[in-house]
Image (cartoon, rainbow, N blue to C red):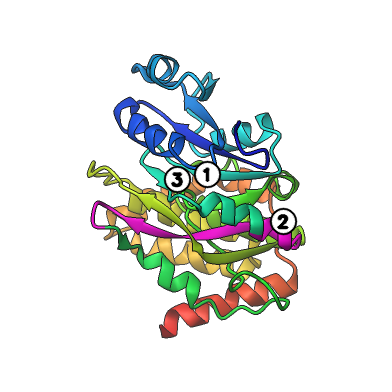
């Protein structure tokens, strides 16, 4: 029987072969979690492959490509109190999900655990591990690790109630650095996001180049500022893009995408409370001096 407390959600699109590797790894875990694939309107044989090779795995088909928002649909569809996320090119090491359940059972203040991530066949530590471990933020005694305001989407375990209370991933960002905004919203909702290095996610990303990713990341950094940061911060970040746009195609592309989304960002704007904004600024200062 699957573990009664935890499930895994995977959002995917048109990557059946890589998804099959992930499902093999997850299906072999001793925790035997329920697995739900949320398919973002794939046009390859993703759904047929899962049905044929992994009949115990659930499939939730989306009518359109929702990107990371498919995770929201997956969390809503499941009933386990804890939800782990994998991408179609990532999975969890044996024992990590059981440890996540223990940590979340032991500390009801924690809304999301950010795991340690290793990358590629050599299992090299992802550089984000060091940044999370060095977080200067402080929280209540007894947390499993330092409080953080960011994580990798493929290396996180969330308390379902916390995720739904915070609203999940924001539709305006779609993909690219969308985890930061969710970490902000979880914190504002009263939950702690903590780094838990005893949990390990394995990520074997494809080598397919994504030349547009830098522009998307800069766009979403700026949109996150408009959605949650003080107005001077959002204006400063937008002015920086505008200054760079004439000579930098990445900034130019990002600025164009920001401008078209600004009305929606303004309507959804909810500035962070002062104590959370202070933590964001502390992290920014630590990043500059690192």
Which residue does the image show at 57% across and 48% down from the upper left? 262
* Res 105 label: 2
Dot 1: element: strand
Q: Earlier in the sequence, mark 1 or mark 2?
A: 1
Q: Which residues are magenta?
A: 103-122
Residue 168 visible, this angle = no
Q: Report if the CB atoms under discs 1 and 3 are less than 8 Å apart.
A: no
Which residue does the image show at 69% across and 46% down from the upper left? 267
Residue 96 visible, this angle = yes
The x, y position of residue 30, in whole percent, is 50, 42
**In the picture provided, is 37 more to the left or to the right than 211?**
right
**In the picture provided, is 43 more to the left or to the right than 196?**
left
Query: What is the distance, in whole Å, between disc 1 and disc 2 at their CAs?
Result: 18 Å
Q: Residues within 10 Å of mark 1 (few under 14, many from 20)?
A: many
Which residue does the image show at 51% across and 76% down from the upper left? 284
Which residue is denoted by mark 3 in the rendering? 257
**In the picture provided, is 147 more to the left or to the right than 66?**
right
Quadrant of the frame with the C terminus: bottom left
Dot 2: element: helix
């Amino acid at each position: 029987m699957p573990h009664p407390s935890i499930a895994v959600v995977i959002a995917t699109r048109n990557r059946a072969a890589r998804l099959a590797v992930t499902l093999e790894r997850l299906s072999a875990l001793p925790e035997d979690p329920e697995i739900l694939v949320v398919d973002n309107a794939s046009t390859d044989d993703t759904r047929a492959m899962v049905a044929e090779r992994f009949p115990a795995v659930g499939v939730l088909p989306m009518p359109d490509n929702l990107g990371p928002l498919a995770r929201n649909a997956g969390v809503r569809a499941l009933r386990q109190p804890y939800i782990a996320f994998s991408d179609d090119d990532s999975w969890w090491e044996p024992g990590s999900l059981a440890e996540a359940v223990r940590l979340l059972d032991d500390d009801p203040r924690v809304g999301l655990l950010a795991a340690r991530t290793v990358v590629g066949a050599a299992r090299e530590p992802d550089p984000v591990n060091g940044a999370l471990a060095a977080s200067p933020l402080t929280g209540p005694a007894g947390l499993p690790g330092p409080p953080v305001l960011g994580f990798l989407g493929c290396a996180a375990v969330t308390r379902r109630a916390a995720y739904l209370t915070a609203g999940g991933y924001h539709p305006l960002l779609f993909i690219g650095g969308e985890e930061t905004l969710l970490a902000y919203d979880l914190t504002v909702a009263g939950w702690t996001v903590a780094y838990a290095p005893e949990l390990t996610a394995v990520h074997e990303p494809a080598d397919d180049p994504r030349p547009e990713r830098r522009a998307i990341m800069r766009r979403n950094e700026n949109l996150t500022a408009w959605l949650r940061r003080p107005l001077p911060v959002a204006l400063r970040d937008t002015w920086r893009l505008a200054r760079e746009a004439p000579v930098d195609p990445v900034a130019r592309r990002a600025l164009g995408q920001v401008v078209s989304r600004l009305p929606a960002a303004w309507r959804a704007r909810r500035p962070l409370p002062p104590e959370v904004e202070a933590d964001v600024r502390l992290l920014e200062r630590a990043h500059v001096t690192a």
